[in-house]
Amino acid sequence: MQDFRYIDNIVTLQLDGKSCIGCGNCVTVCPHRIFGLTERKAEITDRDACMECGACAKNCPVGAISVNPGVGCAAEIMAQWVNKLAGRKIIDGCC
Amino acid sequence: MTSNYKLSFDSLRFQLADIDAWLLVADTRGVNVWCAAGKGTFSTEEIIYSVQQSRLQQLVNHRTLILPQLGATGVAAYKLTKGCGFKAKFGPIRSNDLPRFLRNKQRTDETMRSVTFNLRERAVLIPVEIYLLMKPMAIATLAVLLLSGIGPSIFSATAAWSRGAYFIGASLIGVGCGAFLVPLILPWLPGRQFWIKGLLPGLAGSLICWGLFVSTGEVTPLEGLSLLLWITAFSSYLAMNFTGSTPFTSPSGVEHEMRRGMVFQATAVAVSLLLWLASPFIG
Ligand code: SF4
Ligand code: SF4
């Protein structure tokens, strides 16, 4: 995936190193291989490659990871905008 | 463990043809694992429910479930042991890596765990993009035909046809740029934001359009300018829409670029339509 870089310094991914217990779940699940484990602590190696899918946060047993999860899809975001303006669900997004 | 999206299930069965294994299929209402996990139908609760419903404990004597890695956005694997007695383990992303994974003592390597987006994976998305475009395009075509008929003689059906045809031709060029070219040459297009990636193909398409219609004297340069703006904006919009099909764009990023891209697209389209409407009166 090194051919594809998206916008830098924008993702909401945060890791709280203090509460991490080093289980390695985040390393396993990330489809962009963003986490590494050194001395039983997770670390973020390439934050800008994150697509905010939320898999890591979902599978962290101690809640050390926070990310605002969603799908990076223009139609979905358009749907969210429209539905927010209308105050109810009028259009569906992606998938 | 998989979803009941027909294509995933079929390819899984195909890959596992020579392998003796049980497949547990969660009811995701025909949606694939990735989308279902995002939408909450391929979830921790759903897996627990499927295991209990199928009485898996009585069918097999091991206690390990292999989950597709892309299901991890919806499934907290560490909660499954308590929920249904099965230890869960994430397997590879792609089903064609499964035989290798199973032979390899159920161990994955980095390639099995990383998403890819190669030329073939991008090309298969093109028909989907085109299919989704058909309905809005049909409506827009009607609107354009109506607008093209407006002129000094209030409304002329001949002008609607003859001028409308050029606009439709330009729109098709726009589709060619935004929905064909952009996915194919995505990694080499300049810019990180997709609306910017769509500009260059759009301009290239505009030049073709200029060559076909303006150089030959079929439309005036003013109309040509209108078509140029339209093709570029349309290509930029289609490129932006392609974010939904890629496996690397983050929602924060897409929202960020939409706030910028849509201002450009809306302005360009407004100017384009103004020029198109004004040109019969001027030229
Ligand atoms: S949100 Fe998804 S892409 Fe981002 S770090 Fe977590 S698992 Fe990886
Ligand atoms: S999943 Fe959570 S606890 Fe486990 S290594 Fe990652 S951050 Fe640490």
Image (cartoon, coloured by chain):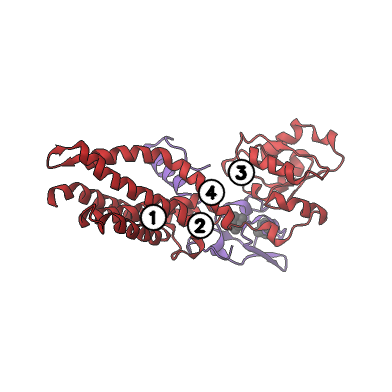
Chain colours: A purple, B red
In the rendered image, residue B35, in percent from the top left (x then y), is placed at 58, 43
What is the crowding at mark 2: few (fewer than 14 residues within 10 Å), some, or many (at least 20)? some
Going from the N terminus, do you reach mark 2 or mark 3 first?
3
Q: Is there one chain holding both mark 3 and mark 4?
A: yes
Question: For the residue labelled by badge 2, is the local secondary structure a helix, a strand or a loop?
Answer: helix
Disc 3 from disc 1: Cα separation: 30 Å
Residue picked out by circle 1 = B236
Mark 2, ligand 1, within 8 Å: the answer is: no
Task: Kindly identify which chain the residue marked by label 3 belongs to.
Answer: B
To which chain does the residue with label 2 belong?
B
Q: Nearer the viewer, mark 3 or mark 1?
A: 1
Q: Image quarter for residue B112?
A: bottom right
Of marks 3 and 1, which one's residue comes earlier in the chain? Answer: 3
Look at the numbered disc 4 and give the secondary structure of its residue: loop
Percent across and percent down for residue B227 are 28, 53
Q: Earlier in the sequence, mark 1 or mark 4?
A: 4
Q: Disc 1 beta carbon < 8 A from ligand 1?
A: no
> Same chain, marks 1 and 4?
yes
Q: Which residue is mark 4?
A: B125
Q: Which of the 4 image quadrants contains residue A66?
A: bottom right
- Residue B37's label in the rendered image is 3
